[in-house]
Image: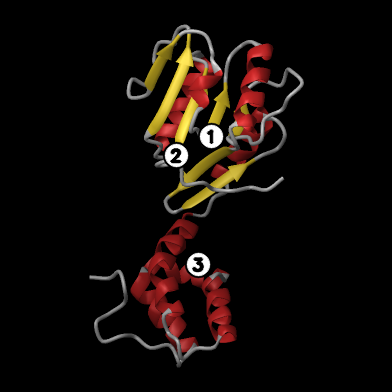
Amino acid sequence: MLSLQLDIRTRRIVIVGGGKVATRKAALLIAAGATDITAIAPAFAEGFPPTIKRVGGAYTPSVLAGAALVFAATDRAEVNDAVVRDARAVGALVNRADADGDLPGDFTLPAKVDFGDIRVTVSAGSAALSAAIREKLIHGFDPHWASLAAAMKTLRPWVVGQSHLTAEERAAIFRELASDEALEVSAGGVEMLIGWIRDRHEKLLVPSAGIPGEG
């Protein structure tokens, strides 16, 4: 298995099903920035996102034309089987909500939690176990990690852009910026991190116009 993060903002996505499971999938996709979602079902649950294009009626393979991602989210195993087969026939990746049937899906949606610029996902072979592990991670999360991750959006392009540094020197800088000491310094903000890392690497140059992304 290979874990990926996909930019789905402009991808065509089809959800087959309109019940509670399909509603949850739809909400997750919208939260991830998806803008081209079509759902097909005989009926849609209360609370199904109104911004999603709806096709009323029984599932038909033609609705999958042009889809990049497909979600088989009905309560009938035989329909989900057909969705998986048809999605693969058109070259789309398919997620299957149920564990029944002969054809598993191509990908799953792990339990996730966001802390600012940090996203933690958990896949444990069981949705309930994944959610339980996620809750444990939430309670053990150090908020300084989020501060350091936000700072790296400025620091990384600054370091990479210094062409006079060797690849080994840049790698050493990034290792130090991932250290426990850097984590503590990050509480003081980006400027304090800059001063801290420049004390350790004199070859780092601060451009006269300031650090990219600042000001």
Mark 1: secondary structure: strand
Query: For the point 45% across and 34% down, which residue is it?
Result: 12
Q: Along the horizontal axis of the image, is 138 left or right of 3?
A: left
How many dots with numbers? 3
Per the model, the C-alpha gap separating discs 3 and 2 is 37 Å
Task: Using the rendered view, name the quadrant where residue 174 is placed.
Answer: bottom right
Q: Which residue is mark 2?
A: 11
Task: Using the rendered view, name the quadrant where residue 102 is placed.
Answer: top right
- Type of residue at label 1? Leu
Query: For the point 41% across and 80% down, which residue is it?
Result: 161
Packing grade of label 2 (10 A; few <14, some 14-19, many >=20) is some
Packing grade of label 1 (10 A; few <14, some 14-19, many >=20) is many
Q: Is residue 201 above or below residue 82?
A: below
Q: Which residue is mark 1?
A: 69
Front in this rendered view, residue 192 or 122: 122
Mark 3: secondary structure: helix
Q: Are marks 1 and 2 in contact (CB under 8 Å)?
A: yes
Q: Along the horizontal axis of the image, is 12 left or right of 122?
A: left
- Type of residue at label 2? Arg
Residue 183's disc number:
3
- Image x and y of residue 85, in percent: 67, 25
Residue farthest right in this picture = 102
Query: For the point 47% across and 54% down, which residue is it?
Result: 143
Packing grade of label 3 (10 A; few <14, some 14-19, many >=20) is many
Residue 151's disc number:
none
